[in-house]
Amino acid sequence: MSDILLIGICGNRLEPEHQQRIKGCGAVVASKRHHGLLAGLDIHRIAITPVEDMIFELAVALQSGDVAVLASGDPLLFGIARTLMERFGPERVQIFPALSAVQLACARFKIPWDDLPLISLHGRPIELLAGRLIAQPKTLLLTDPQRSPSRIAADLLALLEAHNDTERINRLHVRVAENLGWPEERLWEGSLEEAARERFADPNLMLIEQPEAPGTSSVFGLQEDEINHSRGLITKDEVRAVILHRLRLPTSGVFWDIGGGSGSISLEAARLCPGLSIYVVEQKEEGQRNIRANIVRYGLYNISLICGIAPDVFPRLPDPDRVFIGGSRGLLAEIIAPCARRLGKGGRLVVSAVLQNTAEQAPLLMAANGLEADARTIAVTREQKDYGEDGQPSGLRLNPITIITGKK
């Protein structure tokens, strides 16, 4: 049975042993960038893109003998190896990796990369990319022509300016490595504003760095006094914990927080799941100010504030994987119906109910819209350290809250 010889290329050099491997093949898959390495070789060439066309031609060529595939760097790092092994089976793919662009970039920048978050933009739509970038002290991006370093820097700058986050704008530092391993290699570094004005050659990698953002060291359990809110209008700590448990948040996907208030549920969700795209809907200006302040305070730019009224704003949002309804303004039926309709398979909708009417209506509305519903009521008493005259600890009893969960 014929094999696929997947050969990694570092820069503009083809190793002699790889030349011999290619000579023994009936065809070679290569990008235009690598065609110069095949000069003098009389061999059928297959374009590496479009990928589906390449896969078809590769399958045909395999019927007549081995096929070489040239790929930049390490094909196992955001490369073509995964696709080839999925389509043809790992037993038919021989892999000869070279130094990856990530290794070269980190060597040029002189930074360790064992703790470096990597994001590839090649053919991968990423919701709320800014949140992924700003959440980390450093992140390395494999960019693509549509999302160049200048475009990414401009988008980051616009987002931070919209939140008046000048402190973070000043902290962010950008480095870009172009054409690594080739004669036209170039290293660039500067501020976010400078990167937004610069033009960069493709292919390139973009390193975004910032000192550790101020905040808490934990990923869950913000206290009420650590969240900007008004007049005590905030989902209490104990209730917040139960709501998040019932949501069973995915590590990625889309989460709607309807009637966000201070945004406390969104804040906890964003810190627990940095890869989650969160849309918090809030009508009141007071709440909007608090949510913006909390986003800036904790650098949680995977949260998007949607100023408006549910369900009117729903057409502007991507389909959700999870929904939390903390406030409905008497429009519970009008909100639950479109939420249930747009939830994906396995999705969850959670409602918190202080009023008995809401606690009774929510399960019925969920069931009417095809969701499997259950309800749990929690009562919390906070005991204080000081003791009363009777020798018993004093306490604060919170109003009972019913948490209704609808599963699709």
Image: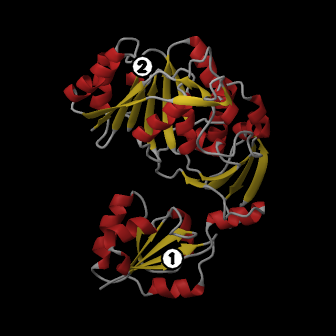
Q: Position of residue 173 (x, y in %)?
A: 76, 45
Q: Where residue 7 is drawn, which disc sits there?
A: 1
Q: Secondary structure at mark 1?
A: strand
Picture layout, residue 176 above or below residue 377:
below
Which three-letter amino acid code belongs to the residue tagged 1? Ile
**Quadrant of the frame with the C terminus:** top left
Note whether 244 is above or below 177 in the view shown: above
Circle 1 crowding by C-alpha within 10 Å: few under 14, some 14–19, many from 20: many
- Residue 31 image position (x, y, % from top left): 49, 64
Q: Mark 1 and mark 2: span between their CA atoms? A: 62 Å
**Residues at marks 1 and 2 touching, judged by CB atoms closer than 8 Å:** no
402 on left or right of 141: left
Residue, disc 2: 354
> Who's the residue at 33% across and 39% down the image?
347
Residue 395 marker: none
Q: Amino acid at mark 2?
A: Val
Closest to the observer, 249 or 187: 249
Q: Is residue 182 visible?
A: no
Q: Could you tell me which residue is drawn at 40 percent across and 39 percent down?
A: 246
Residue 33 in view, yes or no? yes
Left or right of 74 in this view: 245: left
**Closer to viewer: mark 1 or mark 2:** 2
